[in-house]
Amino acid sequence: MEVGLPDQRSGCPINLSVELLGDRWSLVILRDVMFGARRTYGALLNQSDEGISTNLLADRLKKLVAAGMLTATGDPDHKQKNVYSLTEKAITLVPVFAHLGAWGRRWLPATPQYSIRAQLLEEGGPEMWERFMDDLRVEHLGKTSRRLGPTVAEELQAAFDAMAR
C-alpha cells in the first residue's frame, strides 16, 4: 500500500487518484510515454499534439517522478538529457486508459485517426491489455519478453498510421 499524498483531502481511492492524475496534463504525458514512445523532454514537448508549455511539462515530469509514476535516468548519448520510463505503478494504468479511450470515443467528438487505438484496445479487451502491459515492462522495466511478433504498441501505431493515409 502506498503512503498518502501530501495534503490529501481524504483516504478515498478515487479522490487520491484524481489528486495525483487529475490535472490537465499528467494523463496526457503518461499517454505519450506509454503509446507514443516519447521518452525525453524534447520528444514530449515537440511531438505532442496538445502543445504543453515548457514550464508545465517540467513541473508535471517532476511530479510524476516524485509520485513514482515515471523514473528519469540519464541519457547515455547526451548527459544533459533524461530518458523517462514508466514504472509498474504507471503500467498498470493500461486498463484505465483503455476504458477512458472507449468512453471518449463514445461520448466526445474524437477523430477516427485518434480513436483507432482506443477502438483496438476496447476490442482487444483484457487479454490485449495484459500483452500491452507485458510489452511495456520489457521496454521500460527491462523485463524479458517471451513473445514473438509485433508489440501491441507497434500494432496500435500501425493502425494509427494507416488512418493517416
Image (tube, rainbow, N blue to C red):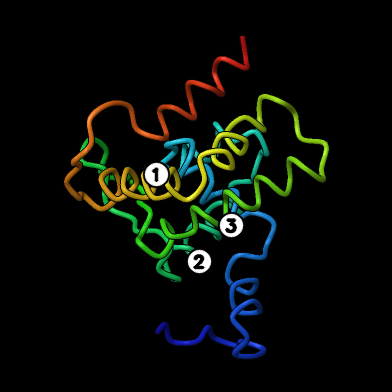
Q: Looking at the image, tell me whether mark 2 or mark 1 is earlier in sequence order.
A: 2
Q: Is residue 137 left or right of residue 92?
A: left
Q: Which mark is residue 63?
A: 2
- Residue type, numbered disc 3: Ser
The residue depicted at 66 percent of the width and 65 percent of the height is: 22
Report whether 67 appears left or right of 122: left
Front residue (pair 109, 82): 109
Q: Is residue 109 left or right of residue 53?
A: right
- N-terminal of the pair, mark 1 or mark 3, is 3
Name the amino acid type tagged 2: Lys
Q: Nearer the viewer, residue 120 or 141?
A: 120
Label 1 sits on what residue type?
A: Phe
x 39%, y 50%: residue: 130
Residue in the image at 58% along x and 71% along y? 20
Q: Position of residue 93 (x, y in %)?
A: 49, 58
In depth, the one of 61 and 165 nearer the eye is 165
Task: Tell me the element at label 1.
Answer: helix
For the C terminus, give its image quadrant: top right
Q: Say if 31 sits above or below 96 in the image.
A: above
Farthest residue to the bottom: give it.
10
Q: Residues within 10 Å of mark 2 (few under 14, many from 20)?
A: some
Marks 2/3: CA–CA distance = 9 Å
**Eye-nearest disc, 2 or 3:** 3
Residue holding disc 3: 26
- In the image, residue 101 lies at what x, y percent? 65, 45
Residue 115 position (above or below residue 56): above
Question: Which circle marks residue 132 in the picture?
Answer: 1
Residue 153: % across, % down? 42, 34
Q: Residues within 10 Å of mark 1 (few under 14, many from 20)?
A: many
- Which comes sooner in the sequence, label 2 or label 3? 3
Q: Quadrant of the N terminus?
A: bottom left
Q: How far apart are the two marked residues, 2 and 1, measured between alpha carbons?
A: 25 Å
